[in-house]
Amino acid sequence: MVKLEYLKKEYEKTRQMPGKWPLSSYRYKFNITHFQPFLKALKEKRLIGLKCRSCNTVSFPPKLVCGKCLVQPDQWVALRDTGMVATFTANYMKDETTGELQSFPVIAIQQDGADTTFLTQLNPAVKFEDVYVGMPVKVKWKNQPEGNLGDIEYYDVIDDATKKMKLQNE
Amino acid sequence: MNKVGIVGYYQVPPALDHNMGRYELIFQAVRGALDNVGLKHKDVTSVVSATNDYYDGRTISNCFTVEAGGGYMKDETKVEMDGAFAVHYGMLRALTGHHKLVLVWGGSMSSCYPYSSSTLLSTDPTFERPLELINDMTAGAFQMRAYMNHFNVSAEDIAQVAVKNRRNATSNELALPESQLPAATTEMILKADVLSSPVTELMYSHPCDGAACIILAPEQQALKIRDDPVWITGVGYSQEAYYLGDRDLTQSQSMKNAAQMAYKMAGVKDPKKETDVAEVFEHFAHEEMIFSEALGFCKPGEGASLSTEIGGELPINPSGGAMSGNTPCATGMIRLIEAAKQIHGDASEHQVKDVHRVVASGQIGLCAQNNILFVLERGGRK
Ligand SMILES: [Zn+2]
């Protein structure tokens, strides 16, 4: 296998120039008043989604503009704290001391009541091998919510009722 | 050749530091333009935006502006330049015959990034940037002194342009409030804080927050939407050398080239006689004079002799020009909107009488490296 490395060779004809590209000087600005109800709900350990009156799409997290309709959605709807894994992958981390490579699942959640998915993390105790699409999950709230997306500490795995179901003709 | 008409437009009032987010600013411009002419989002077939990754704090920034900018599931593209260049791109799309309605928007929020540092980053990393001597202000100062020295133009003459534009801005309800100086005098302009000698703060078009949108349609479609579209009858563009040292800063060869191209297309023989108003993107007061010379309104070095106020022989920037609010990525587009308003008779307090033909320009780069000129004419059925 060819290993790609970000390595600059020492050529005779070309050389590197010292230079700065200070992108960190950007000051991001968002209107938070529009999302105040969402943040307030998070602080109360509740989830709400924003519904577009024109196409009925419920977005979670909420969106300022519905791209489909070019309108600003303004109807808040309550969401359950359960959902299911829509898709997933893994992040890899090397243990500093042992050098062992560990994998952590990263998931997209289809929150019950919402039409969009939310990119988040699973309970770190869950093994990557055990994750599957359709896996039911539930919000694990932070003990002291502050009114931001960090209040969702992670998603916990809950009992998968579909696994216990049996087809009638079996 | 088939023509393209401007059928709608909207400008969000500029502010030094808008109390709104980037998405809302864009949404207001786009929604405003559609609502003004009663068009729907589904009528739009192509969207062209003018934004800049650096100004947006995101790479490939049209990824995030897509919903607010009306580009969702549309034929969508972006120009990393002034909005006037995006209008040209949109015009070409309308001319392909594949698009019935092209929405073009541009803008940025200067309150989110250090504008003049970003212009330093546009300089050459080998010869210019390590010295950190050049940004838009020092470059403009080089240009002003070179121009004054070459043609023996006085600082008072140049300050007079700022006086006119800042007074004109007072009657423009969409001008940046801080740019308006109803009682401006040349003395006031000359005695303002020095930005970079000889340029003072009041000779500079200060960057601010804002956005604008223009809706274009090919001839037949434009006439279905409104009886009086503003026709784009000519367009020209040209770009000069990158390294400032390679350029003649006493004149604008690229604007001359752009004008030649646009006048030829529009059939304009005597620009001074055949033009009723000019709206040019002047980053500095002296650039307006350099441009009026390049546009053929007067001889080189004689920009000061032209009477350019509202009611003068050839009104230039009755809106106050870029000095009335310089929104990076929208300023040139706003010149086009102002031109269209003059033609429609919608310019309220700064309206010029009997306007049939207007030229409007956009620019980008240090000392207006790249210029684009449009000739716009009163529309209607023949
Ligand atoms: Zn919708």
Image (tube, coloured by chain):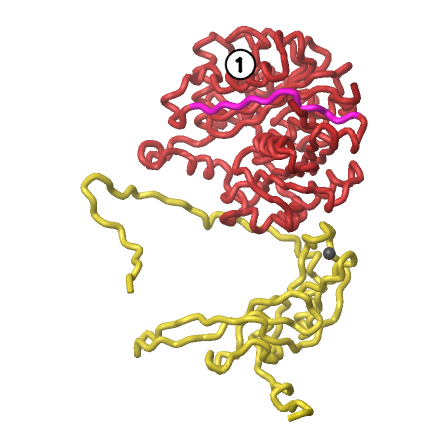
What kind of residue is marked 1? Ala
Look at the image and tell me in which quarter the N terminus of chain B lies.
Answer: top right
Residue at image coords 77%, 14%:
B354
Left or right: residue B161 versus residue B59 is right
Residue at image coords 66%, 48%:
B68
- Give the vertical position of B311 relative to A162 (above or below): above
- The prevailing secondary structure element of the residues shown in magenta is strand
Q: Nearer the viewer, residue A68 or B56?
A: A68
Residue at image coords 40%, 28%:
B242
Q: Chain of mark 1?
A: B
* Rendered location of residue B204, percent (x, y): 55, 26
For label 1, count other residues whose C-alpha is less than 10 Å away and answer few (under 14), some (14-19) or many (20+).
many
- Give the vertical position of B133 relative to A33 (above or below): above
Residue numbers of the magenta segment: B228-240
Badge 1 is on which residue?
B294
Left or right: residue B63 versus residue A113 is left
Q: Which chain is yellow?
A: A
Look at the image and tell me in which quarter the C terminus of chain B lies.
Answer: top right
* Rendered location of residue A8, percent (x, y): 26, 50
Is the distance from the Cβ of mark 1 to the nearest ligand 1 atom less than 8 Å? no
- Give the vertical position of B129 relative to B2 (above or below): below
Left or right: residue A39 versus residue B159 is right
Q: Is residue B145 magenta?
A: no
Chain B: colour as depicted: red
* Rendered location of residue A106, percent (x, y): 50, 71
